[in-house]
Image: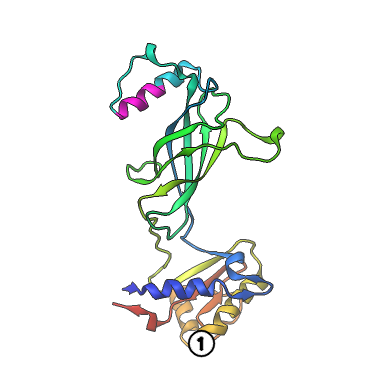
Amino acid sequence: MRVRIMILIIFFLLLSLPAQAERVSVLATIKGTSPLKISGTGIVEGLNGTGDKAVASRKALKTLLAKENINVAMSDIDGQNVAVVSVSAEIPAFTRPGTMIDVTVASLFDAENLQNGILKLTHLRVEGSGETYAVASGRVNIGGEDAANQFPTTANITGGAQVVRAHEVDFLSDRSTFELLLKEPSFATSQAIAHAINSTSGTNPRLDRYLEEAGFEAFDKPVPGFAQALNAGTVIVQIPDYYMMD
């Protein structure tokens, strides 16, 4: 059974409904839609003497260059203008290829400062996976307005990576429901969210039977709609049959 694309639009609209004084999207997240964490190892170049000096860095640099079919001798590598760095980012759920996301760059060895360096093209992957999800590059920028609190070996690149592989998510627990997880559990808030969704979704006399058959135990009497607060931290939402298709 597949879900129509329209249902994603409808339930994201539901997440914008007011619950108490806040929007549902501010109070809760959809279970199974966490950002995808990706990372890689890259090279920041153009550092004007503030790069790596350690022998370990030169060895790592040689290995990275070899992956690009650039073979040089250790004696020919002067690493002080470059730094070996870790590059990390998060891809939000439902992000499509072509989207630009921010990245964080951090020195792996003894570079003194990454400011104004250029990150060479770096492939970002999920740990343990060979698939590239994004490619990063660009000028690094030391963050923070207060110079005393800046970390010169950690930098950001705003919009520094392009997503090349979609972050697919499957948030439907049994192809007919999904769960909202409250960021700050509260019985009153979970009930308010359920009632906010039910105020626009119509009646659903099958909800109480569904909850019983699925083994869910609500902390209060089921309401005649498509959402039910299960506890202080969870609201379950049932998808109406007319949005489902074979």
Image quarter hosting the C terminus: bottom left
> Which residue is pictured at 36% across the width and 50% down the height?
164
Query: In this orientation, does residue 216 appear?
Result: no
Q: Is residue 65 above or below residue 91?
A: above
Could you tell me residue 195's position as x and y percent?
A: 60, 80
Q: Is residue 14 left or right of residue 124?
A: right
Is residue 63 or residue 215 the one in the foreground?
Answer: 63
Read off the magenta span.
60-68
Q: Is residue 101 left or right of residue 243?
A: right
> Which residue is pictured at 51% across the width and 87% down the height?
202
Q: Residues within 10 Å of mark 1 (few under 14, many from 20)?
A: few
> Which residue is pictured at 39% across the width and 70% down the height?
174
Q: Main secondary structure of the magenta part?
A: helix
Q: Is residue 101 above or below residue 204?
A: above
Is residue 220 or residue 47 the one in the foreground?
Answer: 47
Q: Amino acid at mark 1?
A: Gly
Total numbered badges shown on the rendered structure? 1
Is residue 187 or residue 22 the one in the foreground?
Answer: 22
Query: In this orientation, does residue 37 appear?
Result: yes
Instruction: Say which residue label 1 marks.
Output: 202
